[in-house]
Image (cartoon, rainbow, N blue to C red):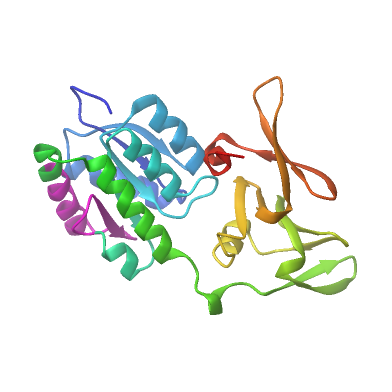
Amino acid sequence: MSTGRLTALVAEDEAPQRRALVEQLRAAWPELELVAVCEDGEAALDAVEEHRPAVAFLDIRMPGASGMDVARAVAAHGGMVVFTTAYDDYAVRAFEAGAADYLLKPVQPERLGQAVERLRQRLAERNGSPAADLQSLLEGLEARLRPRGEQLIRWITASVGESVRMIGIDEVLFFQAQDKYVRVATADGDAVIRTPLKELLMGLDPDTFWQVHRGAVVRVSAIDRLVRNELGRHSLRLKGHPEVLPVSGAFLHRFRGM
């Protein structure tokens, strides 16, 4: 975490809301130095490593790495987190008294002012282990945000040429973003859907499917091995399938111990 300066990072994938939050922050907390304003999770992860901000304002759901992934990196450097979300989720509200706070979108100046005051107080106290507290809170939040059984996707209605195919979720090996479509790969062939990968992720069991790249989500049981090439880039080999999927640095933590 930066010392001597009070630094912050903002990560929000929707441009109008990103601009509005930056303007409101500058008005509510003039001495706060915004060292990075990011439009996706991977850029935010890079910025956290470079700047180690004292505070991060993160959209929970972003392209690439999620706000949860970025929050873990912030916590590792002893920083504090404020999540932004479009949903008044009880799991997020449970964090009001902890090492993280939340703001409903569109962010209201009065509510931002309350969050700023809480952050000022926590930064002034700095008692205990805020990073450890935040890591613990993140684990609890992630568990609560996971979709419940009845909300999980069970069937995919996908296009195959001129026909429509019903694909059971158990058949899917991986999803891959391709232009305006998402490729659905199974052992019996491919199909395409129009549902954005970001939206699709919200209905997938996170213990069964892992996002490994901004444009790729893979069934964990289909993974054979993680490979690193001479340039230091990582990719996945799948069981019984010729496809090689790229793995970005934002998701390498999933493969520790493999």
Residue 250: x and y in percent read 53, 38
Residue 41: x and y in percent read 48, 43
Indicate left or right for 96 with 9 as reference: left
The answer to whether residue 180 of the structure is visible from this angle is no
Q: Residue furthest top?
A: 230
Residue 258: x and y in percent read 62, 40
> Which corner quadrant of the image does residue 73 belong to?
top left
Q: Residue at coordinates 35% horizontally, 41% vertically from top-left?
A: 10
Indicate left or right for 81 with 188 as reference: left
In terms of depth relative to the viewer, which is nearer, 240 or 15?
240
Indicate left or right for 20 with 234 as reference: left
The answer to whether residue 32 of the structure is visible from this angle is yes
Q: Residue at coordinates 25% horizontally, 34% vertically from top-left?
A: 54
Magenta segment includes 140: no
Indicate left or right for 147 with 71 as reference: right
Magenta segment includes 107: yes
Question: Over which residues does the magenta segment extend?
Answer: 96-120
Q: Residue at coordinates 28% horizontally, 28% vertically from top-left?
A: 1
Total marks in image: 0
Q: Residue at coordinates 35% horizontally, 52% vertically from top-left?
A: 138
In terms of depth relative to the viewer, which is nearer, 83 or 33?
83
Q: Residue furthest bottom?
A: 150
> Which corner quadrant of the image does residue 51 belong to?
top left
Residue 139: x and y in percent read 38, 54
> Which corner quadrant of the image does residue 126 belong to?
top left
In this rendering, is residue 168 above or below 226? below
